[in-house]
Image (cartoon, rainbow, N blue to C red):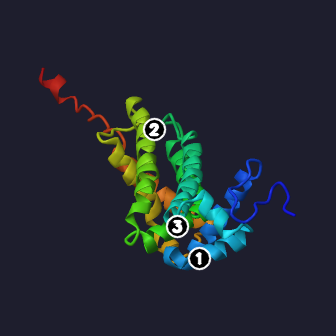
Amino acid sequence: MATQFESQPGEALPARGNAGKRDLIIGATADAICRHGFSGACIDDIADRAKVSRQTIYNNYRDRNALFGAVIEEVMTRANASVFDLLAGFPETGENLEDNLVEFLVSLSLNCVLNKDGRFLRKLVQTEGDRHPELFESWRKHGPLKMVSALGACLAKLTAKGVLEIDDFDVAARQLLALGHADIQMQVLLGETPSDDELERAARNATRTFLRAYAPAAPVPSTGRALASA
């Protein structure tokens, strides 16, 4: 006999066990997609790994695309939460700005690029993006675009305080993110994990390049000639 937390074949998930079972289905689906891609992910294998029936999956997700879309949405929700947690600590003053930006970029790499969710999303975009563009439209709008907008807002605050001199905040945000990833991009594409020293060095290079581009222009010193001629 099934317990109150188990679903009989063909049943929708019970209320008390709903969240836990859905998490198991999402996790099993993500693993299957990582191993076999969208086309090779088997519902029977997913059901077996999640310990639910095939019909239970279809009762909660109308078809494969709905299930795969739910996986992307779940991973993006976690990824966005990590990003906005990091942005909550983004520097708000010019004090120790270089070191604080370095710390931010290192944390971003560790928590959003090199973690399990980051690797999962990156692999999906690389292997399935062309074949299933509809599944990634939500990811594009609610992932990278939302992050750029939020980071741009942080840069706007620093500009308003005279710490930076930026005309287009979204462009500057994209450039900062690209610079932060530039020195480790090849390692990441090859599936390697940069060392702590490599992450710090990449973030330091990115920050210094960014600040050289957007630091306020220094005032031109007076030569005193105007006063002398007067």
The residue positioned farthest toward the front in the image shown? 10
Q: Earlier in the sequence, mark 1 or mark 2?
A: 1
What element does badge 1 sit on? loop
Q: CA distance from mark 1 to mark 2?
A: 43 Å
- For the residue pair 28 and 218, the one nearer the viewer reads as 28
**Residue 39 shows in the view:** yes
Instruction: Identify the residue at image location x=72%, y=58%.
Output: 21
Rendering coords of residue 40 (x, y %): 53, 79
Q: Which residue is mark 2?
A: 154
Residue 58 as seen in the image, left or right of residue 207? right
- Identify the residue shown where x is 53% and y is 55%: 73
Residue that label 1 marks: 42
User: Which residue appears at 27% of the width and 34% of the height?
Assistant: 221
Q: Residues within 10 Å of mark 2 (few under 14, many from 20)?
A: some
Element carrying mark 3: helix
Residue 157, image x, y percentages:
43, 33
Which of the 4 quarters of the picture holds residue 135?
Answer: bottom left
